[in-house]
Amino acid sequence: MANTETTTSETQPTAAAVPFTAMAALAPAIGWLIPGAGHFIQKRWIRGLLLLASVAGLFLFGLAMQGKVYKSNTGDLLDILGFIGDLGAGAFYFAARIFDLGGTAITSANADYGTKYIVVAGLLNIMAAVDAYHIAIGKKQ
Amino acid sequence: MILALQLSHFSAAAIFAFFFSIVFGITQRNNPQEMMRYGAYCFAMAMGGLFVAGWLMWFMHH
């Protein structure tokens, strides 16, 4: 009887190594700094615009609600995580710090919602930057 | 005097759901049709969850 078995290495294609291009480094970096820009430089205009509008919208609503903008700190764990989340918004975070926007303390329920808006805007921007990276390496169209 | 935007809990949650649904739709799916569908699904689930949680809290309170 003939041996019809084949080894798995012959039948299953191995994952191809992803070439690391300049775009793969630039897209997430610029996408973090300016929300949506990682998509703009790869000519995904509508996606970039929607991402920019969403991150900016959440961040600006948060500021308008007197949400707290966290500063670099080594205190409470939640404050540290809040700072990391805020930092994800890139240029919006730096602008808020430079112009001293937002509240300094959470004094009302609305300010608490606003604080969460600002943190989530940063986290969503990180997701957008990762998406720009996936487009740059060809994992996504 | 600082004028802070005042939103109800419902409108704050609805605005939040609207924006995060757009980002989730774009980043979690591969083509425009699937992106729109997934974004709408996320928004619907968030709003549905809001109503369910609201009624649950109402029943717990009464």
Image: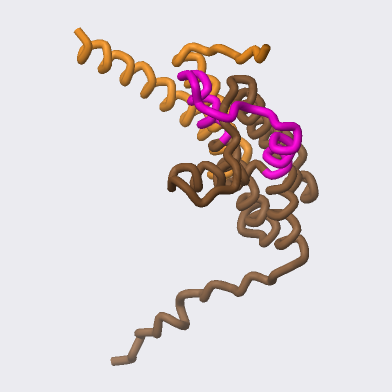
Q: Nearer the viewer, residue B33 or A64?
A: A64
Identify the residue at image location x=51%, y=34%: B38
Q: Check if residue A7 falls in the magenta segment.
A: no
Q: Which quarter shows the N terminus of chain A?
A: bottom left
Task: Residue B48 in the image: state x and y as whole percent.
Answer: 38, 21
Magenta-colored stretch includes residue A108: yes
Q: Quadrant of residue B46?
A: top left
Q: Which residues are magenta?
A: A90-118
Report whether A48 appears left or right of A69.
Answer: right
Q: Nearer the viewer, residue B8 or A35?
A: B8
Residue A88 location (% of width, % of height)? 62, 45
Task: Indicate whether A90 appears above or below A55.
Answer: below
Q: Is residue A97 above or below residue B56?
A: below
Say if residue B25 shows up in the picture.
no
Quick check: B5 left or right of A42? Answer: left
Q: Is residue A2 above or below residue B45?
A: below
What residue sits 27% from the left and 16% below the top?
B57
Residue drawn at 45 percent across, 82 percent down: A9
How would you classify the magenta stretch by its main secondary structure? helix
Q: Nearer the viewer, residue A46 or A74?
A: A74
Q: Is residue A29 left or right of residue A15?
A: right
Which chain is painted in orange?
Answer: B
Residue B41 picture location, percent across and down: 47, 29
How far across and how far down the image is residue B26, in percent? Answer: 60, 39
Q: Is residue A134 visible?
A: yes
- Which of these two is toward me, A66 or A30? A66
- Callout count: 0
Q: Residue at x 67, y 12 (%)?
A: B1
> Which quarter of the figure has residue A8?
bottom left
Q: Residue A139 vs residue A38: left or right? A: left
Q: Please give the letter of the chain rendered in brown.
A: A
